[in-house]
Image (tube, rainbow, N blue to C red):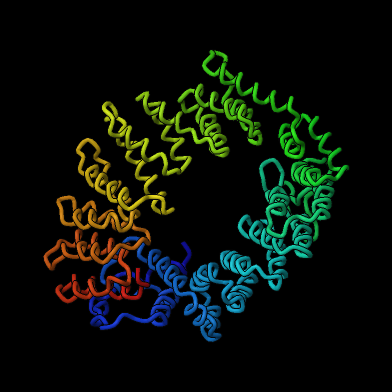
Amino acid sequence: MTPSRLRWIAAGIVVAYASAAAAPAQDAPPDEAARVAYWLDRLQRGPEPTPILLPNFHQGLLLDAQRQLVASPRATLERLADPALRERVQANPVRDAWIALLVVLVPIARERPDVARAWALPAVDDRELLLRRAGVEVLSAVRSPQDAPALLAALRRDSDDRYVTPLALKSLLALGAPWDGEAARVALEAGIGDLPDGTSSTWGGLVPAALESTAGARDDLLAGLALLLESSSPRPPRRTVAGESLPDGTEALGFGHVLSGPGTLPAALARAALARRGYEGPRRSVAADLRSADEALVGIARTAVDPTPQALAAARDAVLRDAALMRAPAAKDPAAVAARARRLRDDASPEATEALARLLEACPAEPAWREVFLTTSDLLRARGAEPTAWVEAALASFDPARVDAALAVVRRSRAFAYAEQLERFHDAAGSAPLRPAVRRELAFLYGVGAAAGEVPPDRAGAFARRVAAWSADPDDPAGRGLLSVLVELGPPAEEVLVAGLGGRLRPAYVDALGQANGRRVPASVTRALLEGVGDATPSAARRAVWIAVFASASGDDDAVLDATVARLRGPARDEAAMLARIVRHRAPR
């Protein structure tokens, strides 16, 4: 941890108790400008003096400040447009506030490119790498040709940095001509052989980034890359020979400069893309690649050639043979079986779907074969044939290994549609030993489904009640850990949270709210959380409540917190007042 970060943390360490006492809460909540001013102050000066040190308080407050500033983009950008503020922050030798504000600017940069640019351009030229990274991210978010020269300079300066390089490269390629060509040139000149086999992550990502860019990859750019990548090699990662530094202006000459190899696969990607566009020369090169002994090269070439009916049939037959031999003593190795299954990725025929289904059905539910059943289920899912029947059969077997395999497929899918199957299995007679594992996958699916808006309120409320019951199950001691999903379920779980906070398992519900991670709860939940706190509450229990308030309360809860401050005395009052000051400056829920 850097000294600057230690100083930032030190600002939040417990100080003299008198200095921690809070002024009475304001009658009216602060307006948007006041909230922005408060959170900017926190980023620059750190936390207010506090009578209680909450876990990860400094980091939590930093994230809170960034979230709140992003939630008020116009007021934030208006404040950041002030040259005096910018000059003061950028002149500070402690760079933390500058970096934090650049993070804030990324999602809102396009609303005021002039403001974003004023903060980011000096950053990309700074000597501190973290600041340069943050500056490049802001300029990439602006997406303007005006910033292309700065991004090119950043790409050249930090060509060995795996954060700056792909970000700047993708941004420049997305701008189209002439910046895509300039970016490719810099990447070719400055890319280093940073991978164990001597290849370059920069070179390897160049063609895919060009093909995926919103501007599209130009034919002449792909042709130039195919030629240059094949005939050259990336720079060596270090300017040393046998541990000795070389004089300036020289560099070590690696084998790649003499023998082809490090740029072969990226060049093949460019040739394949040109062949798909109908160019005869690249098509002949791809035909040669298909005869190579290098399986990776052959795999790239196949993407440019429409497989013949005979080739498709042969690939399907290979998968069917694997399915037939799966349980034989001399069964093929899992990696090879998975590779053959992946050859059916672009075969949308019913016969290919049937072959994959049979392979999944025959696949052993063993850890060694995990790659095969996950790969096969992914391929089926991609063609709209979610393996629900296979999951149903695996669950119905009640075999622990098969059930575990089914749960792995379900988690991989992230599909809320599986929740009903898992609920039926959970309630079936004989599933008791496997229920804890199923409950965790159900909590995962409901959390993902709620975030995507896929869970109807009635089902969310019913599941919340089930989670409350599971948390009290003596046969599942870890079931209390599931309570955090109640926060993710939103309003339908509100009654369950309020009831739990008033029950015998209150400490578990308090801990669950302490894991809210920025999700905000209704004022009724915050009120139930604070009703259990009095002057005589032990400090450990009181601290757990403050952790939960800090993690989950929103600006709507300021009246609840003010009332709590008014009824408390002594240390408890000072602690509550500190939290009230923070919460009242958060945006409403």
User: Dividing the picture into quarters, in which one does residue 115 lie?
Assistant: bottom right
* Relative height, residue 431 to residue 511 (above, below): above
Image coords of residue 408 (percent x, y): 44, 35
Image coords of residue 466 (percent x, y): 25, 44
Number of dots carrying numbers: 0
Residue in the foreground of this view, choosing between 520 and 97: 520
User: Dividing the picture into quarters, in which one does residue 574 lie?
Assistant: bottom left
Left or right: 163 as drawn, with respect to 470: right
Left or right: 454 as drawn, with respect to 206: left
Q: Name the residue located 56 percent from the left edge and 17 percent from the top edge.
A: 324
* Relative height, residue 495 to residue 269 (above, below): below
Left or right: 113 as drawn, with respect to 524: right
**Which residue is most to the left?**
536
Residue 254 in sight: no
* Relative height, residue 565 to residue 231 (above, below): below
Left or right: 211 as drawn, with respect to 455: right
**Which residue is most to the top?**
329
Residue 563 in sight: yes
Q: Quadrant of the C terminus?
A: bottom left
Image coords of residue 51 (percent x, y): 26, 71
Residue in the foreground of this view, choosing between 357 and 400: 357
Image coords of residue 134 (percent x, y): 57, 66
* Relative height, residue 250 to residue 299 (above, below): below
